[in-house]
Amino acid sequence: MIKERAVRHKAVNGNNNIISWIAGGVAALAVFLLINYFLLPPWNVKSIEFWAMVIAVTFVFVFVRYFTMLAQCSRYGYKPKKDSLFLIPVVILLLVVIANVASAVIFHTDAYSSLLKVEDAVFEEDLQESLNTDVIALMDTKSAKMLGGREIGTLSNVVSQFDVSDDYTQIDLNGTPKKVAALNYAGFFKWRNNKKDGIPGYIIVDPVSMSATYKSCDKGMIYVPSAYFGQNAYRKIRFKYPTAMFGNLHFEVDESGQPFYVATVYKKTVIFGGTTVKGAIILNPVDGECEYYDLADIPVWVDDVYDGDLICEQYDLYGMYQNGFINSLFGKKGCKQVTKYRGFEEESDDDAPVSDYGYVSKDGDIWIYTGVTSVNNDSSNIGFLLANERTGEAHYYNIAGADETSAMAAAEGEVQEKGYQASFPSLINIDGNPTYIMVLKDASGLVKLYAAVNVEQYNYVTTAATQKECIAKYRRLMGGEGAEDIKDDTKDDEELEATGEAVISIKDIKYIDIDGNTYIYLIDSEDNIYRAKAGKHEEMLLLKAGDKVSITFAGKEIVSCDKK
């Protein structure tokens, strides 16, 4: 009887063991498939996400196996054996933690500080004089969103189904700076209704003229980040390149205006740390074709591979640890970092200092610019960093002066009675003078003025309604030669001489924003058009269709206007 019971006990345990292994395997496989389909971790041993998936799948397998065996044994009145398999996910987790600690900067100071190769350069030689205002990109993302939203709002057949992406990319398009953003599906059901035809176009914003244009595509973009399931751009790339550690997926267009999505492919140089760029994957959103390029082979039309946040992070590591880890803690000799300020992003509630940067269009590429300051966080810069977002090439200029926040405050103080806010500046060369140039916006986000501030002497400030006029005034202030060559073509009303007069009946009135200034356009009963700057003729804001007015004019510019 005892022998028979022992045989039955062994048989039950054996069957339970098989069933529990099958149950654990099925559960682990289900979790593995779900994680890979929805979370898209890379199958790369240097990725934390990969090991998180391994731990999760292993734990599910052990957990389900054990409790299946426990349930079966309880049914027959037997006690299951102790399961040492629970140690597997614990051991893996412990090894991952040890590897993560071993990746710390303290053990690999040289490796971290050499992620970004920084070359000393001469500012006047590296940055040509910025007398051509068409290459100066001053628009921030918030302003681009506002203009893009306005443009898409005028397209009734588009706005009902699509939104404009919040991710605007700064690119160089045929030698001029632009910001571009694709349309997004406005939710799951809008995707389901339109997935066959895809996204019809994108928005391109001109930061110089402060205008936005909608561009329709010859064929719809099927594989985009806002799509679902197999049409999702992230999933499309992941399934073709399962081991690639990629991020910074963003929208760009080539020189002919064809749309693409570009994803930066990263590599880890120190176990789980030391992130740098390996190459890029370019996805054609129309047909889903994607191709990987090593860093040296990336097409020249691609502008954003090293995103600005990564460059700033790498420079901070270079600046902090180039003289060793002990020096970064105590002596801090030569320790420096990119300038920090407290956020300008309205969406963020975090008041922690963050880095920011401006953009410079140079030699067909987009370079990010940011100031460099000591780690003591004073209000001055000891130099400037200019880095190529496509190649990662970085130049350092040893120029002391005010930091960006101080320059912005100086520009705002010049027109403090108006309450305008300065955007983050760009760095340009005017007659050999390093100069901050920025826009000043009103409370609604409209650009009202441009400001130029001397880096080395930030009490030298000029403001004007256009970039050309601002630079001309700045050159005169700094004693530059040839300022008249770039003087703005427009004249103030006081300078205009009346060449005619008329009594007109107003048929219609339009208010149009040009270069940050509101102009009033009067259309008379004979369809003649006259205009005046609202700031010079505030009384005209009270006019309405049907009024009769007596005007004097020079060409189409109104010199004076009196209501009859």
Image (tube, helix red, strand yellow):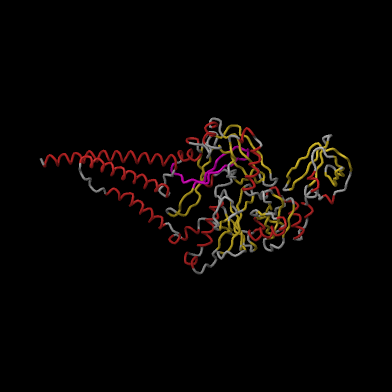
Query: Which residue is drawn at the image coordinates 76% and 60% (left, top)?
Result: 477
Give how far across and how far down residue 267 sits, in percent: 47, 49
- The secondary structure that dominates the magenta segment is strand
Q: Is residue 353 above or below residue 263?
A: below
Q: Which quadrant would residue 152 be assigned to in this image?
A: top right
Who's the residue at 30% across and 51% down the image? Answer: 87
Residue 294 position in % (x across, y down) = 51, 45
Depicted 123 relative to depicted 524: above or below: below
The answer to whether residue 243 is magenta is: yes
Task: List x then y, in percent, for residue 442.
Answer: 69, 51
Q: How many marks?
A: 0
In this view, the residue in front, 549 or 284, is 549
- Give the percent coordinates (x, y) of residue 301: 60, 43
Farthest residue, direction left = 1
- In the image, residue 285 above or below residue 319: above
Viewer-side residue, 431 vs 232 = 232
- Magenta span: 242-265
Vertical position of residue 316 compared to residue 33: above or below: below
**Quick check: is 510 in the magenta stretch?**
no
Q: Quadrant of the C terminus?
A: top right
Residue name at image x 25 percent, y 39 percent = 18
